Structures are given as structure tokens and as C-alpha cells.
Amino acid sequence: MAAVSGRISAPIGWSESRPSLSQSPTNDGNSLLNQAVQMMRPTPSWTCRLLPAIRRRLNSAYARVRWPGVSFGRGCDVRSGLWLYRAPTGVVSFGPECVIDRGMSVEAYGMLAVGARTVFGHHCTLASQSSVTIGDDCLIAELVSIRDHDHCFERIDLVTRSQGMTVASVVIGRNVWIGAKVTVAKGVTIGDNAIVGANAVVTRDIPANSIAVGIPARVVRMRDGSTLGLSASQLS
């Protein structure tokens, strides 16, 4: 019977182009040992997947220790550079499996509640004087600013910082997608499944299932392509 020959595949994560010991130009013990170590070393593709996962777990563990009064749900992925201030009156919670990308800023004198599996891009800003609520499964792109307060500015004989603030709650529903560099102003409600285009400034309510763009943000259509149920004021 003819012998069956074949090539045995290397295990996943190991290089298939390892030098053979017989290829060594010298036969000294140190050279053989160095080649053996090289043959056993995992490839960069394996380590590149493992090390970021370990780093994310360490960052999340550090966040829980650094801010013990803040609730991070199970499986939250807290990236590097989070800046968070919670006043004694502040209540901050992130639901399970949220992603908080690098450089995020959070300031809470009031309530800030984020639902499960919501993802924040890098360098977002959340600021609450009264109440900011964000639902489950939202996508918040990079550099988005969400605040429930603004400066008063009616008087010109007094510097702006001395005129106090106006405050109104912000509510963002579930499965909302907010594009990059959007600003969400005080007193706004964004309905479930809504989409807000990049660079928009949201100063009034956005209905559920709608798409809004521009400065100030205005609804251009519903997600199913219709304008059914939208008033003229909402479309202007």
C-alpha cells in the first residue's frame, strides 16, 4: 500500500514560516536554543488580539476603583482617558456592556443614566445639572456633546458667567444613532430609533423613527422614507 503523505497545518496563532534547526549556520548550543525559542513564540497577530483585551479589562477595573460611587454595569468597556466628576448630588450609571471610548468627559451634578449596550465614540462630553437619560443600544459617535444646561445671556451689563444657567432635562430614547460632532442642547427629547446626522445642533425635539440633520437640526424624513405623521413645523 502506498504511503499517505500530507502537510500538517500549524495551530492557529502560530507562524508557519519557522526556521528549521538544520538551517543554522553554526551548531553551537546558544544558536540552537535561540532558534527553539523563536519557533515557540506566538505570532504578533495573536498577541495583538490578546493585549488590547487585557488592557480594556484593566481600564474597566481601574474605573470601578477610581469612581466607586459610579455604577458601571457588567461587561462595560471603559477605555483610557476617562475624565469624570460626580458632585455629592450627582448620580451616574452606565448599563451592562456599554463602551466608553477614550478621552470621554463626564460631569454630573444631577442624574446621568445610560442604558445597556450603548456605545460612545472618542472624546464625547456628557454634562448633567438636572437629568440626562440615554436609552439602550444607542450609537453616540465621536466628539458628541450632550448637556442639559446653558448660560443665561440676556444682560449685557454683566459678564455671561455671572448670569447663571438655564436647565432642562434631556431624554434620548433607545436605538438612537447620533453622528459625529453633534451637539444636543438642553430640554431636548430624541425619540426611539431616531438618527441625527453629523455636525447637527439639536435644539428641539426629534420624533421617533425620524432622520434629522442641520443647524438647527430639522427632520428630513422618516426611516421608512415617508413623511407620514410629521407636521410642517417638524419638517421646516
Image (tube, grey):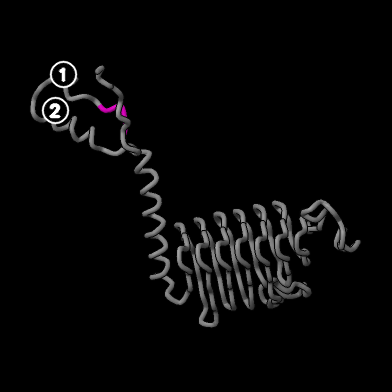
Residue closest to the eye, 173 or 16: 16
**Secondary element at tag 1:** loop
Q: Amino acid at mark 1?
A: Pro
Q: Amino acid at mark 2?
A: Ser
Q: Secondary structure at mark 2?
A: helix
Left or right of residue 27: residue 98: right
Q: Residue furthest bottom?
A: 89
Q: Which residue bears the numbered disc 1?
A: 25
Please tell me in which quadrant of the rendered image residue 172 appears.
bottom right
Give the residue displayed 38% in from the left and 65% down from the top.
62
Mark 1–mark 2 distance (CA, rounded to whole Å): 9 Å
The percent coordinates of residue 205 (x first, y second) are 77, 67
Q: Which residue has dot 2 on it?
A: 31
Hey, which residue is sitting farthest top in the picture? 2
The range drawn in magenta is 14-18
Give the residue displayed 70% in from the left and 60% down from the top.
193
